Amino acid sequence: MVRITFFFIFLAISVFARTGVYQKNCIPCHEDMAVKIDKFFYRYLLKYSSEMEVKNAMSKYLKNPKAENSILVDGLINRFGVKKKTTLSDEQLQEALDTYWEQYKVFDKLK
């Protein structure tokens, strides 16, 4: 019984920690923006189409943000500028991108 309890506690902590990176580091900055965070996802999906390519493009941009590798239109870049380079580790960034993908992916939702 004790092992089962510890297993479920460990599982809950693992799930919380995984989504915690996205919740703590991505959502707060995007909450007050004119373009909501889901719109960024759809722009990336239209341009790159696959999960791996979307995540690679987002990771590349977040590590080295430039207007040239942004998916935003020029008007939005002029208005809001280019974001600051991420301070997340590669592992944290991957966890955040995995959570982001799971939250907004449309493939399992289309009928």
Image (cartoon, helix red, strand yellow):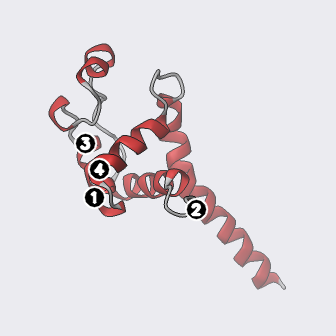
First in sequence: mark 1 vs mark 2: 1
* Mark 2 or 3: the one toward you: 2
Q: Which mark is residue 53?
A: 1
**Amino acid marked by disc 2:** Lys
Of badges 4 and 1, the one in the foreground is 1
Q: Earlier in the sequence, mark 3 or mark 1?
A: 1
* Residue underneath mark 4: 59
Helix, strand or loop for disc 2: loop
Q: Is residue 47 left or right of residue 24?
A: left
Q: Earlier in the sequence, mark 2 or mark 4?
A: 4
Circle 2 residue: 111
| Disc 3 target residue | 61
Amino acid at pointer 4: Ser
Q: Amino acid at mark 1?
A: Glu
Q: Are marks 3 and 4 in contact (CB under 8 Å)?
A: yes
How far apart, in angstroms, are the residues tagged by discs 2 and 3? Answer: 32 Å
Query: Which label was assigned to residue 43?
Result: none
The local crowd at label 1, few if under 14, some if 14 to 19, many if 20 or more residues have their Cα within 10 Å, is: some
Residue 18: x and y, percent? 54, 58
> Does 25 appear above or below 51?
above
In terms of secondary structure, where does tag 3 sit? Answer: helix
Residue 71, image quadrant: top left
Left or right for 27, reference 8: left
* Extreme residue toward the top, this view: 79
Q: Quadrant of the C terminus?
A: bottom right
Q: CA distance from mark 2 to mark 4?
A: 30 Å
- Packing grade of label 2 (10 A; few <14, some 14-19, many >=20) is few
Q: For the residue labelled by badge 1, is the local secondary structure a helix, a strand or a loop?
A: helix
**Nearer to the camera, 77 or 43:** 43
Instruction: Tell me which label, 4 or 1, sits earlier in the chain.
Output: 1
Q: Quadrant of the N terminus?
A: bottom right
